[in-house]
Every structure is written in C-alpha cells, then in structure tokens.
Image (cartoon, rainbow, N blue to C red):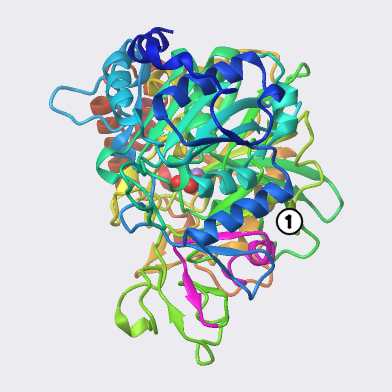
Amino acid sequence: MRSITLLRNVYRPLVLRSVRQLSVTYGNPESLSPKVKQFIDEKAALCKPAAIHICDGSDSEAQMLADVLIKSGTWKKLPKYENCYLARTDPRDVARVESKTLICTPEQREAIPTPAPGVQGTLGKWQDPDSMMESLNERFNGCMEGRTMYVMPFSMGPVGSPLSKIGIQLTDSPYTVSSMRVMTRMGSNVAQALGDQDFIKCLHSVGYPLSNGRSDVPWPCNPEQTVITHFPENNEIISFGSGYGGNSLLGKKCFALRLGSILAKKEGWLAEHMLILGITNPAGVKKYIAAAFPSACGKTNLAMMRPSLPGWKVECVGDDIAWMRFDDNGVLRAINPENGFFGVAPGTSYATNPQAMETIKKNTVFTNVAETSDGGVFWEGLEDEMDLSQVSVTSWLGQENWTKESGKPSSHPNSRFCTPSGQCPVIDPAWEDPAGVPISALLFGGRRPSTIPLVLEANSWNHGVYLGAAMRSEATAAAEHGGKVIMHDPFAMRPFFGYNFGDYIKHWLSFGEKDNLKLPQIFHVNWFRKQDGKFIWPGFGENSRVLEWIFDRTDNAENGHVTPVGILPKPGSINTEGLSPVDMDTLFSINKEEWLAECDAVQKYFNEQIPHDTPAQLQQELDNLRSKLKHENMEANLG
Ligand code: OXD
Ligand code: MN
C-alpha cells in the first residue's frame, strides 16, 4: 500500500475536489461504491480531466462514443459492413511495448529472476514501486486536461461467476472505451455486481493533454513517455502514452495475465495465455482442450477451426486467455475471461479461418488495416478472395492507390480486428458457463521450422511442465522485436509473467504433487516444420487430424509409443485419409544431434535466465531427456 501513500502525499491538496464536484457529463456517480468514488476522486485530482463520463455499457452510449470517434477522425465508418469502423493509429503506436512494461514490487526477485552475470534478463522488467510511482505522478499530473475521463467498471469473465474478477479502468481514450466494451463485460451491471468489494485499479492515459489551446490529433499518444506498469501490492495497473492493444486494454494482458498470474499463484489456480476449444467426435463425445502458443502463431485460427475430418466439430470458448481452477472433484475447469476477439488481421481469410471472417462482418473495429474504395477492408492474405481490380486500396499509412508492387504491405503486420465473441458462428454453448468447461488436454506449441515433430505427448505432468518451460518459437509481429529468430517463450507467457518465472514453474509443478487431481494430459504440437523452405504439414482444418489423435489419447487409446522425447503417434495412427500426400516420416523424424542441440539451448537458457530459480524437478527432466537421447537406441525407440 505504500505507493498509494506516496500518491496521497504528492497530491493531497488536490483531493479537495470530489467526483460530485467535478463535471460528470454522463452517468450517475451515486451508482458507484465509496471505494470506486474515492479511486476516481484521487485520479481525477491528479489527471485534471475537463469532464467525467461514467460508462453504463448501453448501446446508446456506444453510439455516442462512435460519434465522438468519427468526429475526432479516429474512426471512419465502413459502409460495406454493418456497424464496422476503421481506425489508423499513429505509426509509432502499433504494438505492445515489452521494453516499457514493468512489474513494480518491493523486492526485484518477486517479479523477475536474476539472470547470470553479464546476461540481459528477458523474463520481464522490474522497477521499485516508489521511484516508479514518482515518475508516474509526473507523467499523469494534468495529463487529461481538456479531455474526458471515462470510468469503466468491467468484469473479466461472466458477471457474477465465482471464477470472474472485476476491475475499474479510468481512461481518456474513447477508442479504448469502445474496445473494452467489446473485449470485456463493461457497464453498470458490473458496478452493481461489485458492490463494496475491492477491485483491480486501472489507470490509462494516452498522455496528450489538450492544455494551452493545443489541438487534438486523430490518434493522440506519447511514445517517448510510454510505460505500462503493474503494482501487485496495490492490485493496480497504470499505463501511459499508448492507445493501442494490450497497452491500453488493461483487462487483457495486464490484468488477465500479469496480475492474474499473481492472483492465481496466491489462490491456487492458473492464468494462462491459452485458447480454449471444445471438440466433438463423430459419436457425439465432447472434450475441451486449452492450448498455449506465442502471439500470432494461429491461436485464433485453431480456436475456431473448421475440421477437415468428416463428422468432427470444433467450437470456440476463447482464443487468447484461460483462467483455470481445479474443482472439488479434481477436474480442471476453464473460463475465458474475455468477451471479444482482438485478432491479428493479416493472414485471416476464408481459407485460413472462415469462422473469424463470418464473425467480423458486423460490430467490429479494424485497426491499421487497409481500406477499399467500396467502404471495406483489405489485408495481406485476402488477395485470392477479393477482386482488387474493381476497387482501389488505401494502405494503413494512408497511401492511396496502394498496390502490391509498392513493395510495402497494405496493412501493418500487427493490425487487428476487435469483435464480439458472441457473434462467432461456432461459439461454444458453454462459453459463458460460470462453472467453466472441463479440460482434458493442455497443448503447448510454437513455430519451429526444424527438430520438433508435429505432435508428441509428455510422459508425465512434470515432463509436460518441462515442455512448457522449454517452448521456443520464431518471433512475431505482435511485439516490437521483428525478424525470424527462434526465441524462448516459455508457456507462451514470456511477455506476460506477473512474477518470477522460477516460482511460476514451481506453481505448475505443485499440481503434480497433489493426489486428488485429475491432471489433464500435456502435449506439444508444431504445425510449422519445414523441408526445403516449405511447410510439410498443411495446417488449419487439417490440424483436426492431430486433435483426433490427442482426443483418443485422452481416452487411453493405444495409439502412441514411448520414445526418448515423449510419446509419439504409432506409425499410421494419425488419420491421413483424404489428405494430399504428406511426408509423415520427415514430419515425425527425431534427429538425435538436433535434439541434443535443443537440450543445450534449453540448458543455456535456464543457466542464463534462471540460474538461481530453476526448480530441481525441471532440471531433472532436462537431464533425463539428455541421458535418454544419449544412451537409448533411437532406432529401436522410433521403430
Ligand atoms: C495478443 C498478443 O494480442 O499475444 O493476444 O500479443
Ligand atoms: Mn495473446
């Protein structure tokens, strides 16, 4: 609580104005609890907005905000679709900024592991709460001058579910309000459900005050001063300078993953960067799977997949985040804390994700995609599905008459659609079940052009935890670093850990030590193995063949055989009927030298990044793998 004390010290004289005295231009402050009002009072005194708007989440409010956003030039209506809009950001504000995302705890070790001497830590950034709060106070002082402060009560998870949690976000960005309305349950009913309980305090500003007659711009932001900070002690998130994505939709990565993972550790559950899907076999048996992949590895595509296998059905519970808790019967139950999809647009098409294409036809905000002259949108990946000879294209940077020949992409690689989950044609009937859905299998995966087979199953819970900790993937466009380097991204959580990764692994391992739990089986998949520069596996709907194998494994099918690297499908046990020829031998080949090199890379990573925090059981798994690879007869094992 000490940063709050500090805040009070800094601006005590200003706390004289209360929410009732400030100009509340929309909504009823009396509908808010004293704790919420106090939060608004304190932050309004610091940020000095011209007005306060208490969001109710109604349709008329959404329309009012759309009018504001169109008037300010932030949004443009897209007449080709129903209630859809296009936003273009400042080109300096296009992705999450990991380098400026900080966890502020009294002890550094709580937040991040201490790397080996001379090594740059990559498992999060820490700053001490007092100095951070001081520099935030400087940034936030008067930062909302001339603007409206919006107050958003929001619930992560269905309102009233025992697995859900509530936050209050204050922001000066109407774009953020409109997006949060899609991505979370937001409005008066949440304030009502909150009552007088505590909540996660979220403060956000684009950092562009309209003081001294400064005029507004379509995408206000402040890239030089951007910081995204988390204060777990206070249950507080404070973000400054960016209006885009996870930097400003504070319910998503900041709350549901970073603070969420801390709460999960304290309360004995899991907050993970995982999609959740329901899969039904031709006999009508349904199971649920949760899967972790790094950003932009096709999570949304998998979550809504149209299976190529006849008679199989996939339904979507969520595409990005899972909150999971073992119930009284020892069954792992998951909810999707979100209410919308914030999906990467490029690469999304009828060929890759027909369900997403259907979802985004109405009530959707597109950001940083290209616009067509008939009032629609375009991005890389739609070339075969749109006739561009009839329309002209304006790129995300506003370049008119854009063509591919310009050599520049029409859309930013991290351009997004923000669309309500409930509109998805294959949304799972239980997606809002307050009890959550029962999870039978957990998947880890990444983009691995070599070494890693299409699918393998962990030998045990601890081996599964090792597979998560050892995850690596080619870098993506969702964050600021680009290029095709293979990066370590343990549990697909590297940018999202709220606390020390070593402690996080221990938390995962702890479930294996309890004997009353029905632990889900753990798998690793890789859709991206290449030969001669080409993907071997067709992916997308054909991934249902892999899901079928996994489904059967969870029914104890005899379709696997034990190898040094895990349980692989017995030859012929992946259904290839109707599939164009695929080199299954190469897809599943295990090369001893490559795997030993993989062990070296993982060992180096543990030694460098978590030299003091590697749990013994994790090291044991790596040692076991290495010795099996060295001593066992690989040929016999792979037989
Ligand atoms: C996301 C991400 O936006 O992971 O989901 O970056
Ligand atoms: Mn994500």
Count the marks. Answer: 1
Residue 357 included in the magenta stretch of the image: yes
Of the 4 image quadrants, the one containing the N terminus is: top left
Image quarter of residue 24: top right
Query: Which region is colored magenta?
Result: 349-373
Percent position (x, y) of residue 622? Answer: 37, 28
In this rendering, the answer to whether 178 lies above or below 67 is above
Residue 557 included in the magenta stretch of the image: no
Which residue is nearer to you in this view: 88 or 173? Answer: 173
In this rendering, the answer to whether 114 lies above or below 566 is above
Q: Which residue is mark 1?
A: 423
Image quarter of residue 118: top left
Percent position (x, y) of residue 312? Answer: 77, 58
Residue shown at 43%/77% (left/top)?
Answer: 394
Residue shown at 47%/86% (left/top)?
Answer: 392
For residue 454, side relative to residue 422 (left or right): left
Percent position (x, y) of residue 210? Answer: 36, 44
Say what amino acid the circle numbered 1 marks. Gln
For residue 612, side relative to residue 120 (left or right): right
